Amino acid sequence: MSEQGWREFLSAEGIDDWVVLHGGATAVFHVGSLGKAARLAEAITKIPDLEGTGILLTIGDGFLTVRLTRDLWQLEPRHIELARAISAVAREYDALADRSAVQEVQVAIAAKQDEIDVDFWRAVLGYLPMTDDNAVDPLGHGSTVWMQEIDASKPLRHAMHIDVSVAHEQALVRLQAALAAGGRIVDDSHAPEYWTLADRAGNRVCIVSWPDGPVRQPSKGVE
């Protein structure tokens, strides 16, 4: 696994419907009814070579969410053509892509190297491994759990926080909404890739636009 896959996806033409989040490329299509969402999903399943790609379809009342992979690092060149094919089918069904509806919530649990306990979290949640440092809901409904390694000399504060990934053009909208609701910015030194906020009690959450948007030079991940 490397950055090449998701960087190529971000720089590709014809993928405007898609947002690249921690879990890979995701699109939300509005179709107007549950039945139409089911029919769109069925049509997508008929795309050649779809089996084995790691795709996840979630049918809702009037919308269909499509995730090409369960992890950012699993994106490969084949997913570019797959995304284009899915968007083409969606257009045939008059489905409207809504980038503002795409989001992903991740629980980040910080620990020093010798205290990282990803096996515990996989067991207690009934989750499966996707990479060495995370755990994912096998049904695709719950938040991903990511084990964040911290420096051994760093005091362990706020050992658990939430990462909320959104499309890059939605990050400031979400930030402003959180501030209007009483939140405060704790750290904006990594903006616009992410902002760290806190509620009145000091519980932390990161609003993340990385890696969606223009292709950037390699950078640090979310802290």
Image (cartoon, helix red, strand yellow):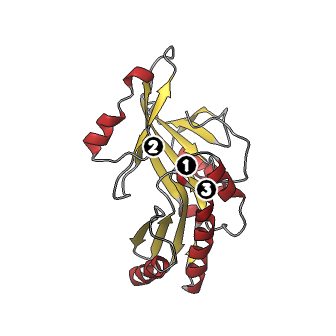
Q: Nearer the viewer, residue 189 or 134?
A: 134
Badge 2 is on which residue? Answer: 131
Q: Give the number of the disc on residue 126.
A: none
Q: Nearer the viewer, residue 171 or 153?
A: 153
Query: Badge 1 local density, few (<14 within 10 Å), some, or many (20+)?
Result: some
* Secondary structure category for the residue under label 1: helix
* Alpha carbon distance from label 1 to label 2: 9 Å
The amino acid marked with disc number 3 is: Ala
Q: Give the number of the disc on residue 167.
A: 3
- Quadrant where the C terminus sits is top right
- Check if mark 2's residue and mark 3's residue have beta carbons within 8 Å: no
Q: Nearer the viewer, residue 60 or 136?
A: 136
Residue 172 vertical position relative to residue 100 in the rendered view, above or below: above
Residue 93 position in % (x across, y down): 54, 85
| Relative to 170, 67 lies left or right | left
* Secondary structure category for the residue under label 2: loop
The amino acid marked with disc number 2 is: Thr
Query: Badge 3 local density, few (<14 within 10 Å), some, or many (20+)?
Result: many
**Discs 2/3, front:** 2
Residue 151 position in % (x across, y down): 52, 20
Badge 1 is on which residue? Answer: 73
Instruction: Say which quarter of the image contains residue 41.
Output: bottom left
Q: Earlier in the sequence, mark 1 or mark 3?
A: 1
Q: Residue at x 67, y 37 (%)?
A: 219
Q: How many marks?
A: 3
Residue 8 position in % (x across, y down): 68, 56
The amino acid marked with disc number 1 is: Trp
